[in-house]
Amino acid sequence: MTDHPFNPQLRAARFLPRTIITARTLPTLRRLTTLTGSTRRPDAQVVAVDDDVSVHVFRPASTRPNTPALLWIHGGGMVLGDAAQDSRFCRRIADELGIVVVSVEYRLAPEHPFPTPLEDCYTALHWLAHQPGIDPARIAVGGQSAGAGLAAALALLAKERGQIRPALQLLSYPMLDDRTTTRTDIDPRRLRIWSPASNRFGWRAYLGPAATAADVPPLAAPARYDDLTGLPPAWIGVGTNDLFHDEDLTYARRLQQAGVATTLHVVPGAYHNFDSFEAKAAISQAFVQAQTTALDQALNAAERTSATGPGR
C-alpha cells in the first residue's frame, strides 16, 4: 500500500466505515438489497437465461445492425449485490455509447461457491453472444470489485473454451488474489468499505470451507493464473487507498508482460468503490469517464473509422 492520504475531493472518507460486509452484517444487507432492488431501475428488461441465471438488459434509444454490447458483473464481495445495483451506470453506458448493456444476476457465495458464480457469468456471456442483432466480436466484459474479479476470470475461461473472445475486459478495482488475505503489512486506517476482515470472509465464502492455499483453482483467483497471453485488452482502475491496489497493479504488469494491451488508471487517495459513494466528486466522474472512453474505443471506434473512411 502507498502513503497517499485520502484525496481531498473525497470528503466522505473521514466518515465512512472501514468495513461493511461481514458474516454478521450479511443477512441484514441482503434483506436491504431485496427491498430496494425493484425500485432502482424500472426501465431494464429482465430476461431469464435459464433456470438459474437471469439478466437485466439495457437497450439504447436507437438500434443499429450488429450492435456492440457490454456484459456487466456487479460487485459485493462474492456474497452480496444484485443485477440492479449498477443500473444508473448501465443505463448511462447504453445511452452514451449506443450499445446494449446486460447486467447478470449470478448466484452468490457462500451458498454457491466457485465455480457456480463464474459459470453463471459464462452462461450469460454465451447467451448474449448469440442474441440477434448483437455483434459477438464486439462484446466487452466488465465489473466492479468482486464483479471485476469475475470478469477477469471470465476472460480467462472464455480463452480456455475458445468459443467467445471478448473485445475488452473492463476491471474496476478487481478482486483478483486470495493471497492478499494473508498479508500483515496493510494499514487498515488507509482503507474504507472493504477491509482485510471482509476480504477474508469473501474469499472464504467463494472458495468454500475446504479450500486451502495449495489447491485454489487459478480460475477462482485470476492472479494465480500462469499464462495470461492471448487475453483481450484490459482497462484496470484502482485507488491508492484500496485494499486491492497492489494486486491490481501486479496483475496489470503481468498482462503487459504477456503482450496484452493494458491501460492502468490509478487514482491517488481513492478508497474502494469511491466512485459509487461519492459519484459527484470530480475524480469519480473522471474515473467513470475513463471507463466510458475505454469502452467506446474498444466497441465503437472501428465502426466510426469504417463509416467516415481513413484520413477524413
Image (cartoon, helix red, strand yellow):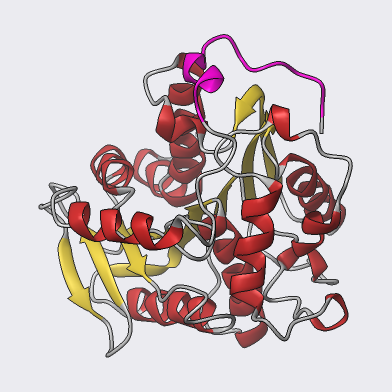
Residue 205, magenta (yes or no) = no
Q: How many marks?
A: 0
Residue beneath the point at 47% across and 19% down: 12
**Residue at the extreme top:** 8
Left or right: where 146 falls relative to 245: left
147 or 22, which is in the foreground? 22
Can see residue 70?
A: no
Residue 226 rendering spot, x and y as whole percentages: 85, 71
For the record, the magenta segment spans 2-16
100 or 124, which is in the foreground? 124
User: Is 237 above or below relative to 258?
Assistant: above
User: Is 170 above or below relative to 117?
Assistant: above
Q: Tell me where residue 146 sits by quadrant.
A: bottom right
Quadrant of the image containing the N terminus: top right
Left or right: where 247 falls relative to 278: right
Can see residue 161?
A: yes
- Magenta: predominant secondary structure element? loop
**Residue at the extreme front:** 24
Residue beneath the point at 56% across and 80% down: 113
Q: Tell me where residue 243 sits by quadrant.
A: top right
Residue 258 rendering spot, x and y as whole percentages: 84, 59
37 or 151, which is in the foreground? 37
Residue 56 rendering spot, x and y as whole percentages: 24, 64
Residue beneath the point at 38% across and 58% down: 81
Residue 291 rendering spot, x and y as whole percentages: 49, 38
Quadrant of the image containing the C terminus: top left
Residue beneath the point at 85% across and 75% down: 213
Left or right: where 156 falls relative to 252: left
